[in-house]
Image: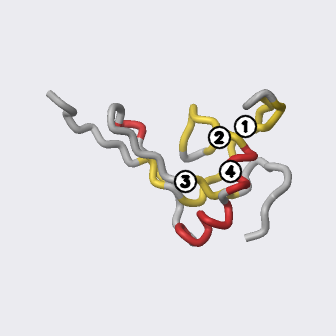
Amino acid sequence: MKKMRVPKIKRDVYVGSSYYIDHGEDDFEGGLCKIKNIEKGRSAGKDTLFVELEERPGHSYNWDYLMEHQEEWAKEFKDRRGYPDPDYGNYGN
């Protein structure tokens, strides 16, 4: 997969999976996701871009971080689409 230097709305990008012990309702299975919004921001003291995805509204990803992992995630996820996978388990209760 060729890396995009600049994000574009409606383009697909790979995103990794996220699993949470204390708030499993936010679990997310990684894969291809469509860019919904792009915003400028700062991370680690430098200017960067953040992208919001159609499949995960309200959550932004650091564009530089996503670009660092595209080849790895392309091998792992291939054509699989990313999707929310909430776990509403009753933790510790």
User: Residue 75 at x, y = what percent?
Assistant: 58, 72
Decide: few, some or many residues near mark 1? Use Cα within 10 Å; few <14, some 14-19, many ≥20.
many
2 or 4: tag closer to the N-terminus:
2
Distance Cα–Cα, label 1 vs label 4: 10 Å
Question: Does residue 50 sit above or below 16 in this rendering?
Answer: above
SS of the residue under disc 4: helix
**Residue at (27% x, 37% y) in the render:** 88
Residues under numbered marks 2 and 4 in contact, where contact means CB atoms less than 8 Å apart: yes
Mark 1 or mark 4, whichever is nearer to me: 4
Circle number at residue 16: 3
Q: Position of residue 78 (x, y in %)?
A: 57, 72
Instruction: Give the residue type that dot 3 points to.
Output: Gly
The residue pinned by badge 2 equals 61
The disc label shown at residue 66, or none: 4
Tag 4: residue type?
A: Leu
Quadrant location of the C terminus? Answer: top left
Provide the secondary structure element on which disc 3 rests.
loop
Q: Secondary structure at mark 2?
A: strand
Structural distance between the alpha carbons of marks 2 and 4: 7 Å
Residue drawn 84% across the image and 50% down it: 6
Q: Eyeballing the image, is 67 above or below 23?
A: below
Q: Earlier in the sequence, mark 2 or mark 3?
A: 3
How far apart are the alpha carbons under marks 2 and 1?
A: 5 Å
Secondary structure, mark 1, is strand
Q: Going by the image, does 28 lie left or right of 91?
A: right
Q: CA–CA distance between discs 3 and 4? A: 8 Å
Q: Earlier in the sequence, mark 1 or mark 3?
A: 3
Q: Badges 2 and 1: C-beta atoms under 8 Å apart?
A: yes
Label 1–label 3 contact, CB within 8 A: no
Disc 1 target residue: 50
Instruction: Please state which amino acid type lies under the numbered disc 1.
Output: Phe
